Image (cartoon, grey):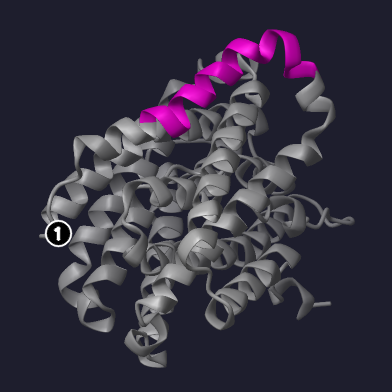
Amino acid sequence: MALRRFLPDNFTLCLLATVLTASLLPCRGGVAHAFEWLTNLAIALLFFLHGAKLSREAVVAGATHWRLHLVVLASTFVLFPVLGLLFKPLLMPLVTPTLYVGILFLCALPSTVQSSIAFTSIARGNVSAAVCSASASSLLGIGITPLLTGLIVRANGQGAMSWHSVGEIVLQLFVPFVAGQIAQRWIGGWVQRHRPLIGVVDQGSILLVVYTAFSAAVLQGLWKQLPLSVLGGVLLINAILLAAALLITRYGSRALGFRREDEITIVFCGSKKSLASGVPMANVLFPAHVLGMIVLPIMLFHQMQLMTCAVLARRYARRLETGKHETPRTDVLAAE
């Protein structure tokens, strides 16, 4: 049982299978074009459903705890990018320049929603504040992440993000999200009753992006450019970023005088990055021939944060009680 919590979840296994399929049977030509259209439609549907699901009442209800929310947002959109840039001289030699752009893009992503709330609940933290913080991060990330990415990529010497990319973000992600918020009045209840549908769209859109991205990357010679030493470098950089975020949010929240429940919320909401938002955004922001390299750090960070936070949540909970503890269902959280 102790070993089981470190094993990859079903969705991670699906991601690995998709990468393997793209490596052996990459799509090309007209098939690749058809997959791109299907992927774009799936991403638009995903953000429409997220807009219809996100409860404005839940966000307003938790909005009064503004100090906590500012700390979480600062960790997500300030601390991570600063760490990514500060660590560059030490960590850049471990990976290729394109992979480090993927690391920097990871640093600009919003926090997860479901897993942040679930782990906060398991650790006996402030769940209502977690709902508000995670939801706000996800919503604001639609606008902040593309802008941060442009600034970080320029600082990394890779050029600036084009206005065309900004327009695509607005059309493909923000417009469907706003449409979902408008339609929430009529379909919000139905979407809440059929939450597994969002999970299917979440995971399906990510798998589509990963397949098309890795197909293009394989045709460009991805695996010839990615030796095991470089892959190990990505894992090490991810581990350093995650450990730094966990330590800073934990001891920083204590230094700022937050209660234990609020500390838990800050730790679990402020240390995560969303795979569900990151992969679709990468699909819009980056050209196809580098997309595989860009999403690889996000995929690895995703599994690393789930395993680490599952252990940490149980440790927090054990300090408060000695009965049976709830075990996080990583299959449900897997698409974030």
The front one of 237 and 245 is 237
Q: Quadrant of residue 223?
A: bottom left
Query: Residue 197: image x %, image y %?
Result: 77, 39
The front one of 311 and 210 is 210
Q: Is residue 52 left or right of residue 122?
A: left
Q: Is residue 279 left or right of residue 18?
A: left
Q: Is residue 200 left or right of residue 59?
A: right
Q: Residues within 10 Å of mark 1 (few under 14, many from 20)?
A: few
Q: Quadrant of residue 66?
A: top left
Q: Residue furthest right?
A: 324
Q: Which residues are magenta?
A: 170-189
Q: Residue furthest top?
A: 185
Q: Is residue 130 left or right of residue 161?
A: right
Which residue is at 32% across, 53% downward? 286
Q: Amino acid at mark 1?
A: Gln
When the figure is inspected, residue 180 is found, relative to residue 85, above or below; the finding is above
Local SS, label 1: loop
Q: Quadrant of the N terminus?
A: bottom right
Q: Is residue 60 magenta?
A: no
When the figure is inspected, residue 71 is found, relative to residue 176, above or below; the finding is below
- Residue 60 seen in the figure: yes
Query: Residue 31: image x %, image y %?
Result: 54, 61
Q: Which residue is mark 1?
A: 158
Which residue is at 48% across, 55% downward? 33
Which residue is at 47% across, 29% downward? 139
Which residue is at 56% across, 26% downward? 132
Q: Is residue 185 magenta?
A: yes
Give the dominant element type of the magenta stretch: helix, strand or loop. Answer: helix
Query: Residue 256: image x %, image y %?
Result: 38, 38
Query: Residue 334: image x %, image y %?
Result: 67, 56
